[in-house]
Amino acid sequence: MDDPDGPDPVFGTKEYKEYTKALMKAYPDNFPAKLVQIPKTNVETLEEKPYEAIYTYIRTDCQRCHVGVKGRNRRGDFRGMGCAACHIPYNNAGLYEGNDQTVKRDETGHSMVHSIQSTRDAKVVVNEMVYSGIPHETCVSCHNRGKRIGVSFQGLMEFPYGSPFTADGKKQPKLHTKVYQFIKDDVHHQLKSRDGNPEGGILCQDCHATTSFHGNGNITGTLLANVEIECSDCHGTATNYPWELPLGWGDEFGRELDMSKPRGVADEPLENNQRFGTLYPAKDGYLLTTRGNPFGNVVREGDKVVVHSASGLDFEVPALKSINLQNKWQNKNAAIAAKIRTPEHLQKLECYGCHSAWAPQCYGCHVKVDFSGKKTAKDWVAAGNTHFPDGHTAESIRDGKPPVAPGVASGKTSENRSYLRWENPVLALTVKAGSDR
């Protein structure tokens, strides 16, 4: 893959495009101009180049979440590929629940219903239940590894045991090939919100609603490149509403900001939101992300911030400046931290550095790639690039089983660790090279 049209994003505001190009110039390694396919591990030269064992690890494990393939056929991991990876509903079991009598009900690998999920205008009906938007479970079918952000958002942590037991005394069924213990879900996921708001959490897409899903036309390789939203984009700070903050506030760019230049709000959402998304009344303007794109679903109403969720619910966001002006802090420590130490806090820490109640911590993580005995594993890169005349790829489900595929990699990966824990997250400062701090 290459990027023949250059560094200019294909859509976004003028401010966003300028911000992105400056970011690309400052961090070129995060914005490659082209991508090449990961090579296979050469077993013949592995003794001289043992580091090439990583190629098998990436091709047989990491790449199963990329949307060029449907992924492995395990509970919680069933999904479509390409656009269908997000927009077609699957249940955890991969079983069909619709009205088409030609689809087997006991055969895994099928979508839940023949429908499309996207905005609050696209309703999905299954077993007389109606919902709109893309459920967390769709996102978590991929985002359960790495930082574990998806399962952590739901309050779940990997657990070495199968308890608590089910109603019939059995261990929990595995999800993503693991069992989980519920700790505490993220405040945005919880059903109970602040007074005056409806019952029900917000969806992943309600915040990640700009370029995070479909990209901006450039090749990106890291979170720094992709994620253009910050907590302050909706909550502001104790001294500033979101529209009073400059562009770049809270972003990990590392440049000086001019506080005398507020970002303001937008009169219209992005063109792609207007064409494909649900249009909401602008009220006093659409809020902007820290990089300059408008949220099509987050609006200003006087000094209030309202999020229109794709679920169909509308939420008022607690604006920190309003809380400060009305002195409605939940505790004195919060007031002191927000009012007195806010500048220092926000220059050194992300908001969630303190506002995360817990974080999963995995110590002594080890990866083994075993090439003995001619061991092999599923090669997702090869599978996703192998196409058949009927439209299937080498990992598509047919008659309940994937077809015989040429996508096989030498070696088999396994993972282990010393122990797990959940406690207060470990905090660390990022220090520039040459700094005396």
Image (cartoon, rainbow, N blue to C red):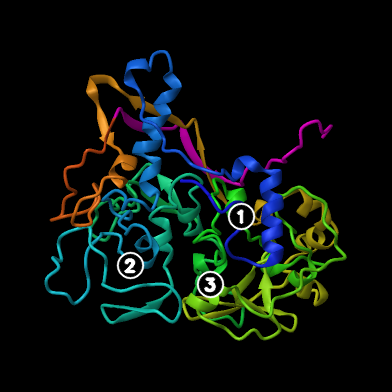
Q: Secondary structure at mark 2?
A: loop
Q: Amino acid type of disc 1?
A: Ser
Within the image, what quadrant is residue 299 found in?
bottom right
Which region shows up in magenta?
410-437
Disc 3 to disc 2, C-alpha distance: 23 Å
Sort mark 1 into few (<14), some (14-19) or many (20+) by Cα contacts within 10 Å: few
Q: Amino acid type of disc 3?
A: Asn
Which circle marks residue 356 in the picture? 1
Q: Residue at x 40, y 49 (%)?
A: 66
Q: Amino acid type of disc 2?
A: Pro
Q: Which residue does the numbered mark 3 point to in the structure image?
A: 272
Q: Is 414 within the magenta?
A: yes
Quadrant in the picture for the C terminus: top right
Is 71 located above or below residue 421 in the figure?
below
Q: Which residue does the numbered mark 2 point to in the structure image?
A: 89
Q: Position of residue 254 (x, y in %)?
A: 76, 47
Q: Position of residue 258 (x, y in %)?
A: 85, 59
Is 375 located above or below residue 305 in the figure?
above
